[in-house]
Image (spheres, grey):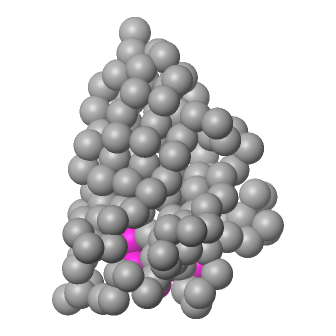
């Protein structure tokens, strides 16, 4: 069956870094665009970044541009998110997700996003940024 398993979250001080991983199985990862999304308590689901199937195309929402880097290793069926210069506003549960179709980003995701945009997603990993 399909599994997306995130890891690498934790407690980090402001200004610190974390690297999230997402191990995929049960579908053809190397042919799939992927996303990282997050949800903080009481806030809407937020799309952070997307990557195409071969890793040659990426995009980021403005709030993480220049701080976060998405990447993938198709040989290992793994998606990554390197997060630098973390702030308390980055505190959330982070999820990897496979979008429906072949498009890895939609402009509407800047103001509207729900789980119906995705075929699969993981259980999430908590990231807490606090001193």
Quadrant for the N terminus in the image: bottom left
In the foreground, 28 or 130: 28
Q: How many marks?
A: 0
Q: Is residue 119 magenta?
A: yes
Above or below: residue 81 compared with residue 101: above
Q: Quadrant of residue 71?
A: bottom left
In the foreground, 32 or 114: 32
Whether residue 111 is visible:
yes
Query: Which percent across, then down, holds residue 36?
Result: 49, 58
Task: Characterize the magenta stretch by its predominant secondary structure.
Answer: strand
Above or below: residue 131 compared with residue 40: above
Which residue sits at x=55%, y=74%? 52
Residue 108 located left or right of residue 58: right
Which residue sits at x=49%, y=78%? 53
Query: Which percent across, then down, holds residue 32?
Result: 46, 83
Whether residue 115 is visible:
no
**Segment tinted magenta in the rendering:** 117-122
Which residue sits at x=47%, y=16%? 14
Q: Quadrant of residue 68?
A: top right
Name the residue at the top extreme.
131
Residue 79 located left or right of residue 14: left
Query: Which percent across, then down, holds residue 37?
Result: 52, 57
In the foreground, 79 or 4: 79
Quadrant for the C terminus in the image: top left
Query: Which percent across, then down, holds residue 121?
Result: 39, 71
Q: Is residue 131 magenta?
A: no
């Amino acid at each position: 069956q399909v599994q997306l398993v995130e890891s690498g979250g934790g407690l980090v001080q402001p200004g610190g870094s974390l690297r999230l991983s997402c191990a995929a199985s049960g579908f053809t990862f190397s042919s799939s665009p992927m996303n990282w999304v997050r949800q903080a308590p009481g806030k809407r689901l937020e799309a952070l970044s997307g990557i195409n199937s071969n890793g040659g195309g990426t995009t980021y929402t403005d709030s993480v541009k220049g701080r976060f880097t998405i990447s993938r290793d198709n040989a290992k069926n793994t998606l990554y998110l390197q997060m630098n210069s973390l702030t308390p506003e980055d505190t959330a549960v982070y999820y990897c997700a496979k979008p429906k179709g072949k498009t890895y980003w939609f402009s509407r995701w800047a103001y509207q996003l729900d789980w119906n945009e995705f075929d699969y997603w993981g259980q999430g990993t908590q990231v807490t940024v606090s001193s």
